[in-house]
Amino acid sequence: MSIGNSPEDDRIFPADDRDSIGRALRQTRIAAGLTVEEVSASTRVRIPIVHAIEQDDFSRCGGDVYARGHVRTLARAVGLDPAPLIEQYDAEHGGRPAPTPAAPLFEAERIRPEPRRPNWTAAMVAAIVAVVGFVGFTMFNGNDAPKGPTTAAEGGPAPAPEKAGSAAKPKPRPATPKPTESAIAAVPQDKVTVKLSAVDDKSWISAKAHDGKLLFDGLLLKGESKTFQDDERVDLVLGNAGAIELYVNGKKLADKFESGQVERLSYTKGDPEAG
């Protein structure tokens, strides 16, 4: 009987000399001259997770799907082919995870109600229709109102019927009353009062108080009148003096100006005199 190795000691067992996933990633990163912080910054994988994966700890990845994605991302960042590492991960962790069925997600997305936006066009059309209807209703009721003479009050005399065929005569416009002695007396004695009337044509006029305050500056049309008062003096500029009739302190001035003549006048309290 010889002393030596037994036949069993001479057997050759196949050895799996392949590095682990974490060791392969770590050694390749070091060889590339990259730090964990640089890899984390380029891949957006947090530093603690990079350290855990390099130590073959995939528990911080949040599941097989995220772990496979991190391994693929880190492999590409350090210059490794990610396919063998993914195959190795699937072989060590029960195979590739089954894909999530898309039908339930599609159904959930399809039945989700979309928020309805307010229909401003329909609201605007409805508002316009309501306004038009209201206007039409108002006009219809106005046309149906009786146009005949109003019935006399109980106990009062009934209005006399108009003769057939007689046309209604327009009422004459009341004439503009001329200043009377009583009107002249009503003018305040402690102020200067100037009244301008455009009788023949229009005229541009300007009126200022004694302190330079502008009382009026504009066009006086034919038939219009303006009255100005001040404690001391009223200064006037008449662009077409011949068309203007002047009353100062209640008294009509007899001065006659020519048409188109420009006059600069000033009046004070008391008996009017053109300045």
Image (cartoon, rainbow, N blue to C red):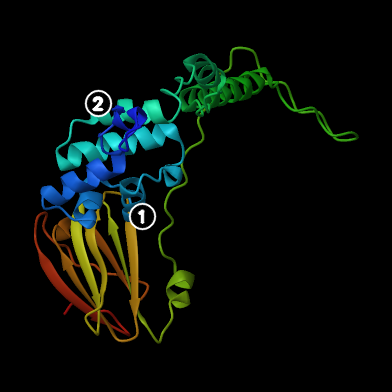
Name the residue beneath numbered marker 2. Answer: 83
Q: Residue furthest right?
A: 155
Residue 241, by quadrant, is: bottom left
**Residue 168 rendering spot, x and y as whole percentages:** 55, 24
Question: Could you say which is closer to the camera, residue 275 or residue 120?
Answer: 120
Name the residue at 24% across, 85% down.
Answer: 211
**If the image is split into quadrants, where does the N terminus sit?**
top left
Residue 234, by quadrant, is: bottom left
Badge 2 element: helix
Which of the two discs, 1 and 2, sits closer to the camera? 2
Answer left or right for 69 relative to 26: right
Question: Could you say which is closer to the camera, residue 117 or residue 3?
Answer: 3
**If the image is split into quadrants, where does the C terminus sit?**
bottom left
Query: Height in image: 184 above or below 13?
Result: below
Could you tell me if residue 201 is visible in this image?
A: no
Amino acid residing under circle 2: Ala
